[in-house]
Image (cartoon, grey):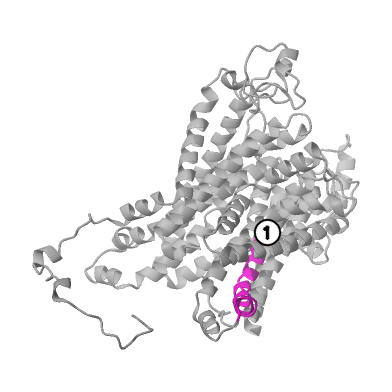
């Protein structure tokens, strides 16, 4: 186990280094300089600014500086927002994104599990078809399309919920639903197939033969085993929530990281884009790492050293 | 078996039985035509309603994407400000009340009459007076192009990389797998976004970004299949008979991996279409005046309150497109490889 964690940590480190390096060189490749947007500066003034930010140093020196700054948690300054530190901007906006993300994962997982159980309990019933249809639709309809339709029908046409903004719980309802559709669909699909497999296994038959009630079989034997693989879904779901938040936050006007990211893309605020990219990468790699370890801890049958299927 | 009366004897009469026809030629006769793998898969696919619906929808949408833009006299970038923001109006359907094709806006106000417009815009117009019918199908064209492109990339790079890695094994495999592991660690979308930032947004940079990131999953699957298959007897037999490496790959391994390859490709297409729409939606994809379904949805948001048709029409088309590819892929997975069934 310790060996496995160590190996994964080394991989994590290498991946992060590569991402940071790519980010650095892409920054250098980007067309234009940070000064193109400023008001007219004399060449001397421009040199002064370039010197101040170390942009006249040779490339290797810049690279080393950039890397050391990264390790100190310094992501540079925004071009568009009065030279505010990127780290600070991310820090300010992390709250709404995290809140919305957790709420969506929680809501989506619970609804998905319930749907999956209902579908598996009565295979080929109306309920099963309904759940399967919801699952296929949830995977197929892009989150931004779904968000748009939600906003139009539940906020504009029939004003049940507020259209956009971030001022209280009722403002989180529509974005949470929009974000969690994919979660619901994926979890329901997975839950259904896992549960069907578990329910047809020998130990369930044994429990049934011993006279255990259906409810007890479901809760004590079937669900516990069917729930384990759901943990593997956390990785892909986290990625989906992250990408989803880019558009959902924009549509519903939520002051989160995703909204900042899209805004920065539109205003060519490169340091912010790079900073958020790195932030997302770290988050993603970290989640995958945690999921891998969790999976090994919960289900000892998984061989940690072996490759994935 | 009669459980209640186990002792009761069943009366057997001789005339209940008939001698079995013992002619060898008859017993060996195959009563149904024998099917090869593909015919069998096609039979199973035909039985899957969802997949057939998907296939039909894909055919219709593809047809419209090819011929739709040339069905009326407008081009995708032709602007006519005096005809801006018109709701949909179709000649034959304008008098059907419950259909939204009567040229009236959401308050029941006839915009065509108000602006004195004689022409019919089947899907309405956008805020610059461009015909949305042409733009929608033009955008669909781009979505399908991206989907096909993703499939081709999967095929070319994914199969080659995975095939080499799985077939040669050993150190080659080791190095290639480490590279893949690192690539897998980097979030896909992030790479695509960075790539598009460096080059100009547009169809070329989306294409390039997908070339770099799109094939990893396919490579892993092909490698896994190759590793599994290459130790089997039929490959060993062929090798013993002196078959070359390329013959082994193309004649023996490839046909056996075709099922998973097709299934993986089919799942790549909808996710590629989604990625393009997503990028266009956040302003990184197709640039105006060109249109993509993602950018049309994005434009639709700006006038959501007043002119919902601008949002709803492209939304429905993109959802249908992705849905039908997913349905077909699901069906193909069940038909080609029942073991992968979920």
Image-based side of A1 in relation to B164, left or right:
right
Q: Is residue B207 magenta?
A: no
Q: Please state, as top left, top right, bottom left or bottom right, where the N terminus of chain B lies in the image.
A: bottom left
Residue most extreme to the bottom: B7
Residue that carries the numbered disc 1 in the rendered image: A239
A100 vs A44: above or below: below
How far from the left and from the top, in percent, is residue A170? Answer: 85, 51
* Numbered range of the magenta stretch: A213-237
Residue B13 in sight: yes
How far from the left and from the top, in percent, is residue B56? Answer: 46, 40
**Main SS category, magenta section:** helix
For the residue labelled by badge 1, is the local secondary structure a helix, a strand or a loop? helix
Question: Measuring 69% from the left and 70% from the top, which residue is drawn there?
Answer: A13
How far from the left and from the top, in percent, is residue A16? Answer: 69, 65
Residue A271 in sight: no
A256 vs B225: above or below: above
Question: Measuring 46% from the left and 63% from the top, which residue is drawn there?
Answer: B340
Q: Is residue A228 magenta?
A: yes
Residue A302 or residue A279, whichever sits in front: A302
């Amino acid at each position: 186990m310790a060996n496995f964690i160590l190996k994964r940590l080394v991989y994590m480190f290498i991946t992060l280094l590569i991402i940071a390096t790519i980010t650095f060189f892409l920054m250098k490749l980007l067309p234009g300089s940070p000064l193109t947007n400023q008001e007219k500066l004399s060449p001397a003034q421009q040199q002064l600014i370039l010197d101040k930010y170390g942009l006249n140093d040779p490339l290797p020196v810049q690279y080393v500086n950039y890397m050391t700054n990264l390790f100190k948690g310094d992501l540079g300054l925004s071009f568009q927002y009065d030279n505010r530190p990127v780290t600070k901007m991310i820090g300010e906006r992390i709250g709404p994104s995290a809140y919305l993300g957790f709420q969506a994962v929680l809501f989506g997982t619970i609804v998905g599990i319930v749907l999956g159980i209902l579908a598996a309990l009565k295979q080929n019933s109306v309920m099963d078809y309904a759940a399967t249809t919801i699952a296929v639709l949830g995977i197929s309809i892009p989150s931004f399309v779904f968000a748009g339709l939600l906003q139009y029908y539940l906020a504009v046409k029939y004003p049940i919920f507020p259209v956009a903004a971030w001022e209280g719980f009722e403002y989180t309802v529509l974005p949470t639903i929009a974000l969690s559709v994919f979660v619901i669909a994926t979890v329901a699909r997975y839950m259904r197939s896992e549960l069907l497999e578990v329910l047809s296994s020998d130990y369930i038959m044994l429990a049934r033969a011993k006279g255990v009630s259906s409810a007890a079989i479901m809760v004590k034997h079937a669900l516990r085993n069917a729930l384990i693989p759901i943990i593997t879904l956390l990785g892909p779901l986290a990625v989906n929530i992250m990408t989803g938040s880019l558009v959902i936050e924009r549509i519903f006007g939520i002051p989160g990281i995703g909204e900042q990211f899209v805004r920065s893309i539109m205003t060519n605020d490169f340091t912010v884009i790079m900073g958020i990219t790195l932030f997302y990468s770290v988050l993603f790699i970290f989640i995958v790492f945690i999921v891998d370890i969790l999976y090994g801890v919960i289900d000892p049958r998984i061989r940690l050293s072996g490759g994935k299927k | 078996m009669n459980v209640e009366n186990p002792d009761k004897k069943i009366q057997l009469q001789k005339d209940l039985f008939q001698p079995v026809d013992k002619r060898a030629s008859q017993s060996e006769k195959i009563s149904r035509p024998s099917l090869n793998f593909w015919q069998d898969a096609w039979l199973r696919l035909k039985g899957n309603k969802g997949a057939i619906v998907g296939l039909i929808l894909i055919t219709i949408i593809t047809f419209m994407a090819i011929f739709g833009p040339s069905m009326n006299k407008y081009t995708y970038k032709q602007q006519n400000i005096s005809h801006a923001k018109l709701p949909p109006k179709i000649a034959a359907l304008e008098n059907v009340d419950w259909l939204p094709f009567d040229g009236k806006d959401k308050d029941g106000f006839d915009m065509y009459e108000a602006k004195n417009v004689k022409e019919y815009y089947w899907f309405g117009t956008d805020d610059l007076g461009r015909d949305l019918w042409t733009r929608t199908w033009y955008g669909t064209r781009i979505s399908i192009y991206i989907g096909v492109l993703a499939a081709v990339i999967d095929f070319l790079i994914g199969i080659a990389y995975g095939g080499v890695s799985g077939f040669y094994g050993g150190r080659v495999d080791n190095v290639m797998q480490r590279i893949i592991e690192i690539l897998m660690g980097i979030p896909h979308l992030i790479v695509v976004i960075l790539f598009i930032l460096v080059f100009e947004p547009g169809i070329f940079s989306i294409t390039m970004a997908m070339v770099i990131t799109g094939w990893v999953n396919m490579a892993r699957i092909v490698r896994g299949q190759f590793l599994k298959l290459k130790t089997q007897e039929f490959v060993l037999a062929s090798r013993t008979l002196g078959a070359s490496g390329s013959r082994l790959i193309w004649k023996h391994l490839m046909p056996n991996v075709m099922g998973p390859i097709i299934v993986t490709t089919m799942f790549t297409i909808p996710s590629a279409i989604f990625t393009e729409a997503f990028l266009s939606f956040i302003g990184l994809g197709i640039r105006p005046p060109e249109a993509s379904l993602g950018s049309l949805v994005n434009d639709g948001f700006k006038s959501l309150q007043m002119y919902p048709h601008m949002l709803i029409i492209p939304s429905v088309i993109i959802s249908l497109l992705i849905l039908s590819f997913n349905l077909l892929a699901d069906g193909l997975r069940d038909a080609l490889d029942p073991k992968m069934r979920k």
